[in-house]
Image (cartoon, grey):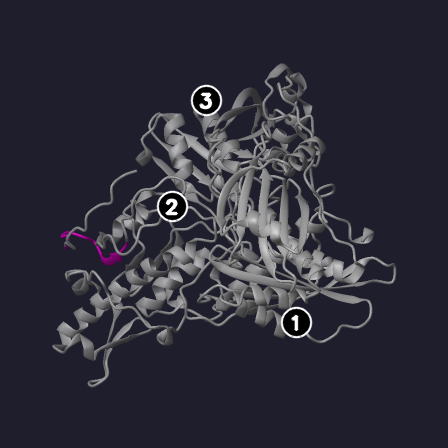
Amino acid sequence: MAAPMNRRTFLRQSGMAGTALAIGFYFTSCEGEAPEPEGVIELYKLNVDDIAKGTALNPFVMIEPTGEITLMSHRPDMGQGTFQAIPLLIAEELDVKLDQVTIKQAPGNAKYGRQGVGGSASVRTMWEPMRKMGAAARAMLVQAAAQQWQVEAAQCRTENGEVIHPVSKERLSYGSLVEAASTLEVPESPNMKSHDDFRLIGQSVPRPSIVKKVQGQANFGIDMKKEGMVYALIERSPNFEGDAIRIDDSAAMAIPGVLQVVECKRPLFKKDIPGVAVIAENYWAALQGRKALKIEWEAPERLLDTDSLLAEMHDKTNEEGLLDQEEGNFKKAYEKASEQLTASYETPFLAHAAMEPQNALVEVTETTCEVWAPTQFPQWAQNELASILELEKENINIHVSFLGGGFGRRALPDFIVEAALLSKSLKKPVKVVWTREDDTQQSPMRPGSVNQLQGGLDEEGRLVALQHKVVTPDIGHSLFGSYDENKVPGGVMEPVGESFYGLSNYASRYVFVDADPIPLVWWRSVYSSTNIFGHESFIDELAIAANKDPMQFRLELLESQPRKRAVLELLREKSNWDQPLPEGKARGVAICHCFDSTAGHVVEVSRDSSGKVKIDRVVTAIDCGTAINPDNVLAQCEGNIVMGLTAAIKSPITFKDSVVQQSNFHDYHVLRIHEMPKVDIHIVPSTEPPTGVGEPALPPMAPALCNAIFALSGKRIRRLPFDLGEV
């Protein structure tokens, strides 16, 4: 990891065709999940003509003498709204409207700091740095105007890209001030707006990317083209490990447009997955050529099937496991409890099923590599390419497009490296496109899990002891081969390592399961999506055993945690929880605290005329601190509801002899629009710093639904997914 650069003097350059005030940060160059830097590390000036030519000078904001303002969004957008949210933070402090600026997606470059998106981290980690950048620019422009008017800067104010002197009523545009401002000292700690002064933050501002996407103007990775490129479709080992023993490509080579057939590999960190690539002039020829291939694959040493692996997980609940964290003394309190309960909950392996399959266009030369790809972690791809291609990172350019969904899958650069290796071998630009079947069967998946919980109640029905044991594979082991049998892997216990209810006798434990050769990776909300199903279902079981209302039971547990309790109180109010439902209807509740936010749902269910359970309504509440764009918060919660319901009642990923059995949406079903219940989403008002939005509302979806079904039918669901027609 490179050391952070020192703040350098804000110098004026001579001989420029145009002058621009460009203010940006130099962050610590980071790999993987390095921590975010804090504060303004450096602010600097650059040549606008260089920017026009694409020189990588790390700009975040440019103000040209013409008055044109360009803001750079340095976090990839996979639908979560960072394309607008990051520049909006700058625009707020710069005092300009979004319709006054042009937003551009920054290329992958270490000069922008950590550019990866995941963990609902973009806005919550950029909240202060991006605002500070805008505030510093505004302060310099105000100072330049004050000097021209020969007044105190404190007497001036800004509005919509102008500096105003209220006494004289004079105004100067940012464009007219930029040259003078560029000569001034950059403030180390500029004054930022108070919450009451926000004009953009907290407003449901339209997202400019939505219009482009609806009109077909937005560029996704799959849209990228380059003169002279060829297409590559790759037949890969169906069991992730076996080599090709025999290849008959005669029929493939007879397809018009097919150029050649070559063996290739897909580096997936600790393993290389073998493949056979059909190279063609167009996608259709490559697809037909691949279908015509006849390949005999070698079987790996270890063949797994889903049923046996999940059965192993259930058996492992009998193991003590590694202690993650403990508050108080669970064992002692549990033994003294008047009533003891134990239950296990199972969640399946899942695919990411992003609407845009994996793809990458790469051109490798002797000294450079140009990449056009939808990636969540451009610098991760850059680092991998530098190592594998033996090129300097500075000579690897990652052009980041919009992402047609990601959910964690596009954090991995395997599909980019795959294209790069082919380009290097063929000495021409190569566009690798995965089919939907490839994406379903070859992508790393969310791990399945079994969660075992034990809880004890006293004579008054109070929860006095709780233990949560997680039995699941470790994603880090799957990707990197790193696993310490004496240490609980990072992230695997989220968010149940500590009790977010603040219980006095609580323990969390972990039991490792080896799922090789099945590749695993993060899935939206990661382990929270599996761990909370068991946790919140069991809290409901404890409430029923204590003869208490499930909502009131949780509220009592959160007596000393007002912010989390406020989420439940809002749910209680908006769902009319205390008002009885008509016969044949029922409600269930669940909450989760993850990614620094608290979210919860109340689900209403009933039975239709055929007796099948129908999901009528989902009431959602979320405390995400300051809501940067409330409309986007609602959209993310809606997406979480869709994915959470899909994971609960639709298809699992299953494998036999280590081969995934599902292939497309005909056998890997997702929630359809006619199945979507009515949703009613509420944001807890807050002036606290923003917290995660993209993932927190997903984990409590399944347990809220299952708790509602128990209230309706008396049947406790402990295994996902399940069929609504069978409960």
Which residue sits furthest front? Answer: 336
- Amino acid type, label 2: Pro
Across and down, in percent, residue 273 comes to 55, 25
Lower sequence index among marks 2 and 3: 2
Asked if residue 642 can be seen in this view, the reply is no
- Amino acid type, label 1: Ser
Mark nearest the camera among 1 and 3 is 1
Question: On residue 463, which mark appears?
Answer: none
Lower sequence index among marks 1 and 3: 3
Closer-to-camera residue (601/352): 601
Which element is circle 2 on?
loop
Span highlighted in magenta in the image: 12-24
Question: On residue 425, which mark appears?
Answer: 3
* Residues at marks 1 and 3, CA–CA distance in whole angstroms: 60 Å
Q: Which residue is mark 2?
A: 107
Which residue sits furthest top? Answer: 246
Q: Residues within 10 Å of mark 1 (few under 14, many from 20)?
A: many
Across and down, in percent, residue 434 comes to 59, 35
Residue located 63% across and 52% down the image: 455
Across and down, in percent, residue 238 comes to 64, 26
1 and 3 marks in contact (CB < 8 Å): no
Q: Is 18 a magenta residue?
A: yes
Closer-to-camera residue (474/545): 545
Q: Which residue is mark 1?
A: 575
| Residue 29 position (above or below residue 46) | above
